[in-house]
Image (cartoon, rainbow, N blue to C red):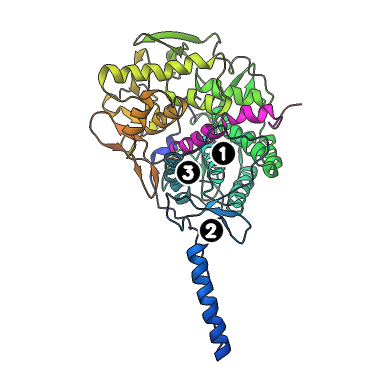
Amino acid sequence: MTMQNSNDKNDNETNKAPFAVSKGLGNFIAPMPLNRGIFSMAIAGLLGVAVAVAIIFWPKEPASNRAGNALVYNNSMPLLTPVYQKSVQAYLHPIHTLNDADIEKARIAWKFFEKNYQKATGLINAVDKYPSTTMWDTGSSLGATIAAYDLGFINEKEFDDRVMTMMATLYELKLFANKAPNKVYDTTTGSMVNYKNQASDVGIGVSALDLARLASWLNILAGTHPKHALSARNIMLRWDLKELIKEGQMYGLALDSVTKEIRVLQEGRLGYEQYAGKVFKMLGFDQKISATYNNEYKATVNINDVPIAYDNRDPRKYGAYNYVVTESYVMDVFEHGFDEENRTLTDNIFEVQKRRWQKTGLVTAVSEDNLDRKPRFVYNTIFAAGSPWNAITDTGKDMEDLKSLSTKAAVTLAYLYPDDAYSEELLNAISSAYDPEVGWYSGIYEKGLGYNDVITSNTNGVILTALLYKKYGPLNRVLNKAGKSLKLTP
């Protein structure tokens, strides 16, 4: 996610374009021709009886396909839908069992990645039918692919094909100013573009926050699938991060459209800053400011008698708003785990939205989201620009009429707090917010405008990776304890 003045969300996610179709998997058994002759006919008859008996009494054991992957059939699903068993590293221990409802949510989410996969590059559209992506969305797509393999939606061959093609593209990307990946790329060609998906030889800039999202899932890929570890590390070693990570903070690069000079801007505000800072700290970089919530920029405001942390940097001075939303806190926990700093902060993010529902009757789970109408992107916040429950654009324009219940926020909060009764309210509220052939919608408008039916890689990727959190816990923490995290510094 790229934020305005190195603190804005991805504008490229706001358009739609031609439909992308992926191929499904089919299995069949070819009939064997019978020999002529009386003896052969008798043998054939006996074989027919044997086959019939076998079909009736055959034990429900996993069949095997030609790739050597065992096929396991879920009784709640059609028999011809394969669920592949997979190899799992010994240090990955499931802590919870996924139920049928979990798998159904994940299957819907995976539809997006089937429909929007670009086979030539291995990249996936950020928005349905629109061939453009960012490093943030590529991280979400990689996480979704790891989840799809773990859940048995694709076999090892399909997983490796997708990952290796994506890794090759990421390794060969033209870098902005020869430093790091550009903010946006065309998914069909892997070439640099601007936010309108127009080709650009020089690019538009670099987001350190976006790189952190991708780096987090490259690290998880390396730890969960060691055969891809070298590729994952080599991709990141191409990045020249000296100007992007320094003085304990993260910085973005932006090409000035007038002067054509490259500006270096501090990037990140409380929430997303800590999520990304922890990623780079894990990889070996100094993030003494960005990786902690208890830095000098933290302030607190009471909303519904719940203390909510926010970033006190004035947008009039620093040029970027601080948006208090659900996503950054949930992703921090999903990937890094609860700790002494984020436990209370995240609990309060859940509690304040629950209290708004109790007070107003409006089921509340807010985050930044793409829209299916102008202005195409809005920050639905707990707190922003000095006001609670503010819905604004990146320029601060009021979008009160487009407030929505965010699908990804509702699902992730429910998985983070499964024992709270409000989680059931959240899941019930968004239970029909999807297209069965494409994936989960971004949300539901509060004021009766119906579904916000734009469908994105980030919403569906976050939902898929929520299942990994339920099953294994925070994967970066799990891998770090096992000594399997990547290091980019000596």
In the rendered view, tell whether residue 312 sits above or below residue 182.
above
Viewer-side label of 2, 3:
2
In the rendered view, tell whether residue 398 sits above or below residue 95.
above
Q: Which residue is mark 3?
A: 132
Looking at the rendering, the stretch of residues picked out in magenta corresponds to: 458-486
| Residue type at the position of mark 3 | Ser
Q: Which residue is mark 1?
A: 202
Nearer-the-camera pick, 284 or 110: 110
Residue 331 seen in the figure: yes
Q: Position of residue 399 (x, y in %)?
A: 30, 25
Label for residue 383? none
Alpha carbon separation for disc pair 2 and 1:
61 Å
Local packing at callout 3 (Cα closer than 10 Å; few below 14, some 14-19, many 20+) is many
Label for residue 59? 2
Nearer-the-camera pick, 399 or 204: 399
Q: Position of residue 46 (x, y in %)?
A: 54, 79
Residue 200 part of the magenta segment: no
